[in-house]
Amino acid sequence: MADSRSVFVFLLQSIVVGLAVAFLVVLVRPDLMPGLRDPVEKPASFADAVDLSAGSVANIYTKRLVPDGDASTARTRFRVDTSFASAVIIDPEGFLVTNYHVIADATEIRVQLSDGRITDPEIIGVDAETDLALLRVDFGPLPAIRMGSSAQLRIGDVVLAIGNPYGLTASVTQGIVSATGRGLLNLVTFENFIQTDAAINAGNSGGALINSRGELVGINTAVLAQDAATEGIGFAIPIDLVRGVVDQIKQNGRVIRGYMGLVPDDLTNAERAARGIENDVGILLIEVYEDGPAAAAGLQRGDVILTMNGEPVFSQRQALLISASTVPGDAVEITAIREKERFNSTVIAGERPEDPR
Protein backbone atom coordinates (compact mmCIF):
# COMPACT_ATOMS: atom_id res chain seq x y z
CA MET A 1 0.00 0.00 0.00
CA ALA A 2 2.86 2.31 0.92
CA ASP A 3 4.51 1.51 -2.40
CA SER A 4 1.33 2.40 -4.31
CA ARG A 5 1.04 5.71 -2.44
CA SER A 6 4.67 6.55 -3.26
CA VAL A 7 4.12 5.80 -6.94
CA PHE A 8 0.98 7.97 -6.95
CA VAL A 9 2.81 10.89 -5.28
CA PHE A 10 5.70 10.55 -7.73
CA LEU A 11 3.34 10.59 -10.73
CA LEU A 12 1.44 13.60 -9.35
CA GLN A 13 4.66 15.53 -8.77
CA SER A 14 5.80 14.70 -12.30
CA ILE A 15 2.54 15.93 -13.78
CA VAL A 16 2.69 19.18 -11.79
CA VAL A 17 6.30 19.80 -12.78
CA GLY A 18 5.51 18.99 -16.42
CA LEU A 19 2.58 21.36 -16.49
CA ALA A 20 4.70 24.12 -14.90
CA VAL A 21 7.43 23.65 -17.50
CA ALA A 22 4.88 23.66 -20.34
CA PHE A 23 3.34 26.86 -18.98
CA LEU A 24 6.73 28.57 -18.89
CA VAL A 25 7.52 27.43 -22.45
CA VAL A 26 4.19 28.75 -23.76
CA LEU A 27 4.73 32.02 -21.92
CA VAL A 28 8.33 32.59 -23.01
CA ARG A 29 8.64 30.73 -26.35
CA PRO A 30 5.20 30.05 -27.82
CA ASP A 31 6.84 29.47 -31.21
CA LEU A 32 8.24 26.15 -29.85
CA MET A 33 4.75 24.76 -29.23
CA PRO A 34 3.23 23.50 -32.52
CA GLY A 35 -0.40 24.40 -33.03
CA LEU A 36 -0.31 27.37 -30.64
CA ARG A 37 0.81 30.00 -33.15
CA ASP A 38 -1.62 32.49 -34.65
CA PRO A 39 -3.17 30.69 -37.67
CA VAL A 40 -3.21 34.00 -39.62
CA GLU A 41 0.39 34.97 -40.38
CA LYS A 42 0.65 38.69 -40.98
CA PRO A 43 3.63 40.07 -42.96
CA ALA A 44 6.07 41.75 -40.63
CA SER A 45 8.16 43.22 -43.44
CA PHE A 46 8.00 44.30 -47.08
CA ALA A 47 11.69 43.54 -47.57
CA ASP A 48 10.96 40.83 -50.14
CA ALA A 49 8.94 43.27 -52.26
CA VAL A 50 11.75 45.82 -52.12
CA ASP A 51 14.36 43.18 -52.98
CA LEU A 52 12.37 42.24 -56.08
CA SER A 53 12.04 45.78 -57.40
CA ALA A 54 14.69 48.14 -56.02
CA GLY A 55 17.33 46.94 -58.48
CA SER A 56 15.09 48.11 -61.32
CA VAL A 57 14.93 51.72 -60.09
CA ALA A 58 17.63 54.01 -61.48
CA ASN A 59 18.75 57.51 -60.51
CA ILE A 60 18.64 60.44 -62.92
CA TYR A 61 20.79 63.55 -62.66
CA THR A 62 20.03 66.51 -64.93
CA LYS A 63 21.52 69.91 -65.60
CA ARG A 64 19.70 72.98 -66.93
CA LEU A 65 20.68 76.54 -67.74
CA VAL A 66 18.37 78.89 -65.86
CA PRO A 67 18.36 82.70 -65.76
CA ASP A 68 20.26 84.09 -62.81
CA GLY A 69 18.45 87.25 -61.81
CA ASP A 70 16.26 89.43 -64.04
CA ALA A 71 15.69 87.56 -67.31
CA SER A 72 14.26 90.66 -69.01
CA THR A 73 17.55 92.49 -69.28
CA ALA A 74 19.69 92.37 -72.39
CA ARG A 75 22.66 91.03 -70.42
CA THR A 76 20.96 88.13 -68.68
CA ARG A 77 23.33 85.73 -66.95
CA PHE A 78 22.66 82.05 -66.49
CA ARG A 79 23.57 79.46 -63.90
CA VAL A 80 23.59 75.68 -64.00
CA ASP A 81 20.77 74.05 -62.05
CA THR A 82 21.31 70.40 -61.03
CA SER A 83 18.33 68.16 -60.20
CA PHE A 84 17.76 64.63 -58.90
CA ALA A 85 15.07 62.26 -60.14
CA SER A 86 14.33 58.59 -60.76
CA ALA A 87 13.48 56.15 -63.56
CA VAL A 88 12.25 52.57 -63.75
CA ILE A 89 13.65 49.78 -65.95
CA ILE A 90 10.61 48.24 -67.63
CA ASP A 91 12.33 46.09 -70.25
CA PRO A 92 15.50 43.94 -70.11
CA GLU A 93 16.63 45.61 -73.36
CA GLY A 94 17.35 48.81 -71.45
CA PHE A 95 14.11 50.80 -71.70
CA LEU A 96 13.35 53.08 -68.73
CA VAL A 97 10.30 55.18 -67.93
CA THR A 98 10.47 58.50 -66.14
CA ASN A 99 8.48 61.74 -66.05
CA TYR A 100 8.61 64.15 -68.96
CA HIS A 101 9.14 67.07 -66.59
CA VAL A 102 12.28 65.34 -65.28
CA ILE A 103 14.09 65.66 -68.62
CA ALA A 104 12.29 68.64 -70.21
CA ASP A 105 14.72 71.41 -71.26
CA ALA A 106 17.66 69.53 -69.73
CA THR A 107 21.08 70.24 -71.25
CA GLU A 108 22.54 67.08 -69.73
CA ILE A 109 20.93 63.82 -68.56
CA ARG A 110 22.78 61.08 -66.71
CA VAL A 111 21.36 57.72 -65.61
CA GLN A 112 22.90 55.73 -62.78
CA LEU A 113 21.81 52.11 -62.33
CA SER A 114 21.52 50.43 -58.94
CA ASP A 115 24.85 48.68 -59.52
CA GLY A 116 26.60 52.04 -59.94
CA ARG A 117 27.02 52.11 -63.72
CA ILE A 118 26.46 55.56 -65.25
CA THR A 119 25.64 56.58 -68.83
CA ASP A 120 23.91 59.16 -71.01
CA PRO A 121 20.51 57.76 -72.07
CA GLU A 122 18.88 57.96 -75.47
CA ILE A 123 15.50 59.73 -75.43
CA ILE A 124 13.18 57.41 -77.37
CA GLY A 125 10.10 59.64 -77.06
CA VAL A 126 8.03 61.78 -74.72
CA ASP A 127 4.39 62.46 -74.01
CA ALA A 128 3.92 65.80 -72.29
CA GLU A 129 0.14 65.29 -71.98
CA THR A 130 0.63 62.42 -69.52
CA ASP A 131 4.05 63.59 -68.23
CA LEU A 132 5.88 60.46 -69.39
CA ALA A 133 9.19 59.90 -71.17
CA LEU A 134 10.82 56.73 -72.49
CA LEU A 135 14.61 56.44 -72.30
CA ARG A 136 17.04 53.71 -73.28
CA VAL A 137 20.53 52.79 -72.07
CA ASP A 138 22.97 50.39 -73.75
CA PHE A 139 24.25 48.14 -70.98
CA GLY A 140 23.09 44.74 -72.21
CA PRO A 141 20.37 42.80 -70.35
CA LEU A 142 19.04 44.68 -67.32
CA PRO A 143 16.79 43.68 -64.38
CA ALA A 144 13.31 44.78 -65.52
CA ILE A 145 10.73 45.37 -62.83
CA ARG A 146 7.73 43.07 -62.53
CA MET A 147 4.58 44.70 -63.90
CA GLY A 148 1.39 44.81 -61.88
CA SER A 149 -2.09 46.11 -62.71
CA SER A 150 -3.32 49.48 -61.51
CA ALA A 151 -6.88 48.45 -62.37
CA GLN A 152 -6.75 45.99 -59.47
CA LEU A 153 -5.73 48.61 -56.90
CA ARG A 154 -8.13 49.28 -54.05
CA ILE A 155 -8.24 52.14 -51.60
CA GLY A 156 -6.35 50.95 -48.55
CA ASP A 157 -3.85 48.75 -50.42
CA VAL A 158 -0.29 49.04 -49.15
CA VAL A 159 2.13 50.67 -51.61
CA LEU A 160 5.83 51.55 -51.49
CA ALA A 161 7.55 54.44 -53.27
CA ILE A 162 11.14 53.80 -54.39
CA GLY A 163 13.33 56.57 -55.75
CA ASN A 164 16.15 59.06 -55.36
CA PRO A 165 14.77 61.82 -53.08
CA TYR A 166 17.24 64.64 -52.52
CA GLY A 167 19.94 62.40 -54.00
CA LEU A 168 19.43 59.70 -51.35
CA THR A 169 19.58 56.68 -53.66
CA ALA A 170 17.28 53.66 -53.31
CA SER A 171 15.09 55.27 -50.64
CA VAL A 172 11.82 53.51 -49.80
CA THR A 173 8.71 55.00 -48.20
CA GLN A 174 5.50 53.20 -47.32
CA GLY A 175 1.85 54.21 -47.41
CA ILE A 176 -1.53 53.20 -48.75
CA VAL A 177 -3.60 53.96 -51.82
CA SER A 178 -5.71 56.94 -50.78
CA ALA A 179 -7.70 57.26 -54.03
CA THR A 180 -7.69 56.19 -57.67
CA GLY A 181 -8.79 58.01 -60.82
CA ARG A 182 -7.84 61.36 -59.31
CA GLY A 183 -8.10 64.31 -61.71
CA LEU A 184 -8.82 68.05 -61.88
CA LEU A 185 -5.34 68.84 -60.51
CA ASN A 186 -4.25 70.77 -63.62
CA LEU A 187 -0.91 68.97 -63.66
CA VAL A 188 -1.26 67.39 -67.12
CA THR A 189 -3.90 67.17 -69.86
CA PHE A 190 -4.95 63.59 -69.19
CA GLU A 191 -5.15 63.02 -65.45
CA ASN A 192 -6.00 59.67 -63.92
CA PHE A 193 -3.72 59.61 -60.89
CA ILE A 194 -3.25 57.18 -58.03
CA GLN A 195 -3.26 59.19 -54.81
CA THR A 196 -1.07 57.89 -52.00
CA ASP A 197 0.27 58.98 -48.64
CA ALA A 198 3.61 57.26 -49.27
CA ALA A 199 6.12 60.11 -49.08
CA ILE A 200 7.02 61.40 -52.58
CA ASN A 201 9.73 64.01 -52.19
CA ALA A 202 11.86 65.97 -54.64
CA GLY A 203 13.85 63.38 -56.57
CA ASN A 204 11.14 60.68 -56.35
CA SER A 205 9.65 61.87 -59.66
CA GLY A 206 9.86 59.08 -62.22
CA GLY A 207 10.39 56.43 -59.54
CA ALA A 208 8.44 53.27 -58.83
CA LEU A 209 5.22 52.87 -56.89
CA ILE A 210 5.00 49.14 -56.10
CA ASN A 211 2.48 46.92 -54.36
CA SER A 212 3.25 44.53 -51.49
CA ARG A 213 4.26 41.84 -54.02
CA GLY A 214 6.97 44.04 -55.54
CA GLU A 215 5.02 44.72 -58.76
CA LEU A 216 5.04 48.12 -60.45
CA VAL A 217 1.63 49.80 -60.20
CA GLY A 218 2.52 53.44 -60.90
CA ILE A 219 5.18 56.01 -61.77
CA ASN A 220 5.60 58.59 -58.99
CA THR A 221 4.95 62.04 -60.40
CA ALA A 222 4.01 64.83 -58.04
CA VAL A 223 3.17 65.92 -54.54
CA LEU A 224 0.56 68.49 -53.63
CA ALA A 225 2.10 71.86 -52.71
CA GLN A 226 3.67 71.39 -49.31
CA ASP A 227 2.15 73.26 -46.41
CA ALA A 228 0.68 72.37 -43.05
CA ALA A 229 -2.63 71.34 -44.63
CA THR A 230 -1.37 69.10 -47.46
CA GLU A 231 1.09 66.73 -45.84
CA GLY A 232 1.13 63.20 -47.25
CA ILE A 233 -0.67 63.75 -50.57
CA GLY A 234 1.27 62.37 -53.52
CA PHE A 235 0.31 61.23 -57.01
CA ALA A 236 1.46 58.49 -59.39
CA ILE A 237 0.58 57.68 -63.01
CA PRO A 238 -1.16 54.26 -63.11
CA ILE A 239 0.85 51.54 -64.83
CA ASP A 240 -2.04 50.59 -67.14
CA LEU A 241 -1.85 54.11 -68.65
CA VAL A 242 1.96 53.93 -68.78
CA ARG A 243 1.82 50.69 -70.77
CA GLY A 244 -0.27 52.25 -73.53
CA VAL A 245 1.95 55.32 -73.79
CA VAL A 246 5.15 53.24 -73.87
CA ASP A 247 3.77 50.92 -76.56
CA GLN A 248 2.89 53.88 -78.79
CA ILE A 249 6.25 55.58 -78.29
CA LYS A 250 8.04 52.33 -79.19
CA GLN A 251 5.92 51.92 -82.33
CA ASN A 252 5.61 55.52 -83.51
CA GLY A 253 8.15 57.56 -81.58
CA ARG A 254 5.23 59.52 -80.14
CA VAL A 255 1.67 59.01 -78.90
CA ILE A 256 -1.04 59.20 -81.55
CA ARG A 257 -4.41 60.10 -80.04
CA GLY A 258 -7.83 60.74 -81.42
CA TYR A 259 -9.10 64.31 -81.58
CA MET A 260 -12.68 65.53 -81.58
CA GLY A 261 -12.09 69.29 -81.65
CA LEU A 262 -14.14 70.22 -78.61
CA VAL A 263 -13.60 71.53 -75.10
CA PRO A 264 -15.92 70.05 -72.43
CA ASP A 265 -16.75 71.43 -68.99
CA ASP A 266 -18.65 70.04 -66.00
CA LEU A 267 -22.28 70.99 -65.46
CA THR A 268 -23.73 72.23 -62.20
CA ASN A 269 -26.98 70.78 -60.88
CA ALA A 270 -28.72 74.08 -61.66
CA GLU A 271 -27.51 73.94 -65.28
CA ARG A 272 -28.78 70.38 -65.60
CA ALA A 273 -32.17 71.32 -64.18
CA ALA A 274 -32.47 74.26 -66.60
CA ARG A 275 -31.96 71.86 -69.50
CA GLY A 276 -34.39 69.27 -68.20
CA ILE A 277 -31.71 66.72 -67.30
CA GLU A 278 -32.98 64.73 -64.32
CA ASN A 279 -29.80 62.89 -63.27
CA ASP A 280 -26.13 63.90 -62.94
CA VAL A 281 -25.13 62.94 -66.48
CA GLY A 282 -23.88 65.39 -69.09
CA ILE A 283 -20.97 67.72 -69.96
CA LEU A 284 -21.22 71.19 -71.52
CA LEU A 285 -19.35 72.10 -74.71
CA ILE A 286 -17.73 75.47 -74.03
CA GLU A 287 -15.82 75.42 -77.32
CA VAL A 288 -16.17 73.63 -80.65
CA TYR A 289 -13.20 74.32 -82.91
CA GLU A 290 -13.95 75.50 -86.41
CA ASP A 291 -13.16 72.88 -89.08
CA GLY A 292 -12.66 70.24 -86.35
CA PRO A 293 -14.34 66.80 -86.26
CA ALA A 294 -17.05 67.87 -83.80
CA ALA A 295 -17.97 70.92 -85.89
CA ALA A 296 -18.12 68.73 -89.01
CA ALA A 297 -20.56 66.46 -87.16
CA GLY A 298 -22.85 69.43 -86.38
CA LEU A 299 -22.02 69.93 -82.72
CA GLN A 300 -22.08 73.50 -81.44
CA ARG A 301 -20.90 75.46 -78.47
CA GLY A 302 -23.52 75.21 -75.71
CA ASP A 303 -24.56 71.65 -76.57
CA VAL A 304 -24.64 69.13 -73.74
CA ILE A 305 -23.25 65.67 -74.47
CA LEU A 306 -25.04 62.91 -72.56
CA THR A 307 -23.38 59.77 -73.94
CA MET A 308 -20.33 58.85 -76.01
CA ASN A 309 -20.46 55.45 -77.72
CA GLY A 310 -23.39 54.55 -75.48
CA GLU A 311 -21.47 55.33 -72.29
CA PRO A 312 -23.04 57.97 -70.00
CA VAL A 313 -20.68 60.91 -69.57
CA PHE A 314 -20.54 62.47 -66.10
CA SER A 315 -17.44 64.66 -66.14
CA GLN A 316 -15.02 66.70 -68.22
CA ARG A 317 -12.21 64.30 -67.33
CA GLN A 318 -14.20 61.27 -68.50
CA ALA A 319 -14.98 62.97 -71.83
CA LEU A 320 -11.31 63.84 -72.40
CA LEU A 321 -10.19 60.27 -71.62
CA ILE A 322 -12.80 58.80 -73.99
CA SER A 323 -11.71 61.20 -76.73
CA ALA A 324 -8.02 60.44 -76.17
CA SER A 325 -8.64 56.68 -76.24
CA THR A 326 -9.83 56.87 -79.84
CA VAL A 327 -7.54 56.62 -82.85
CA PRO A 328 -7.86 58.71 -86.03
CA GLY A 329 -10.76 57.43 -88.09
CA ASP A 330 -12.78 56.05 -85.17
CA ALA A 331 -16.49 56.85 -85.17
CA VAL A 332 -17.78 58.21 -81.85
CA GLU A 333 -21.56 58.03 -81.45
CA ILE A 334 -22.90 61.05 -79.56
CA THR A 335 -26.21 61.67 -77.81
CA ALA A 336 -26.63 65.34 -76.93
CA ILE A 337 -29.15 68.04 -75.97
CA ARG A 338 -29.59 71.43 -77.62
CA GLU A 339 -32.27 73.76 -76.31
CA LYS A 340 -33.88 70.83 -74.43
CA GLU A 341 -34.10 68.76 -77.64
CA ARG A 342 -32.18 65.50 -77.84
CA PHE A 343 -30.30 64.55 -80.99
CA ASN A 344 -27.72 62.03 -82.17
CA SER A 345 -24.51 62.65 -84.07
CA THR A 346 -21.42 60.76 -85.21
CA VAL A 347 -17.98 62.34 -84.81
CA ILE A 348 -15.17 60.89 -86.90
CA ALA A 349 -12.04 61.35 -84.79
CA GLY A 350 -9.05 63.08 -86.32
CA GLU A 351 -5.47 63.03 -85.07
CA ARG A 352 -4.81 65.12 -82.01
CA PRO A 353 -2.39 67.97 -82.93
CA GLU A 354 0.56 68.90 -80.73
CA ASP A 355 -1.28 72.07 -79.70
CA PRO A 356 -5.00 71.24 -79.87
CA ARG A 357 -6.11 74.76 -78.97
Image (cartoon, rainbow, N blue to C red):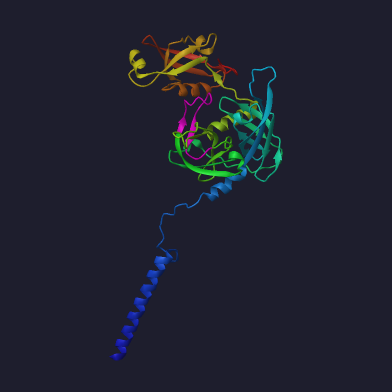
Report the label total. Answer: 0
172 or 261, nearer to the observer: 172
Q: On screen, 199 above or below 101?
A: below
Q: On screen, 74 above or below 7?
A: above
- The residue located at (54%, 11%) in the rendering is 292
Main SS category, magenta section: loop
242 or 104, nearer to the observer: 104
- The residue located at (50%, 15%) in the rendering is 262
302 or 118, nearer to the observer: 118
Q: On screen, 128 above or below 26?
A: above
Where does the image place residue 265, in percent across and percent down from the top left? Answer: 44, 18
Q: On screen, 125 above or below 111?
A: above
Image quadrant holding the N terminus, namely bottom left
Where does the image place residue 55, in percent across and percent down from the top left? Answer: 62, 45
Where does the image place residue 77, in percent across and percent down from the top left? Answer: 69, 24
Residue 93 visible? The answer is: no
- The residue located at (39%, 69%) in the rendering is 24
Q: Which residues are magenta?
A: 180-200
Is 6 one of the magenta-colored residues? no
Q: Is residue 102 left or right of residue 18?
A: right
Where does the image place residue 250, in percent across and percent down from the top left? Answer: 64, 30
Residue 192 visible? The answer is: yes
- The residue located at (68%, 28%) in the rendering is 79
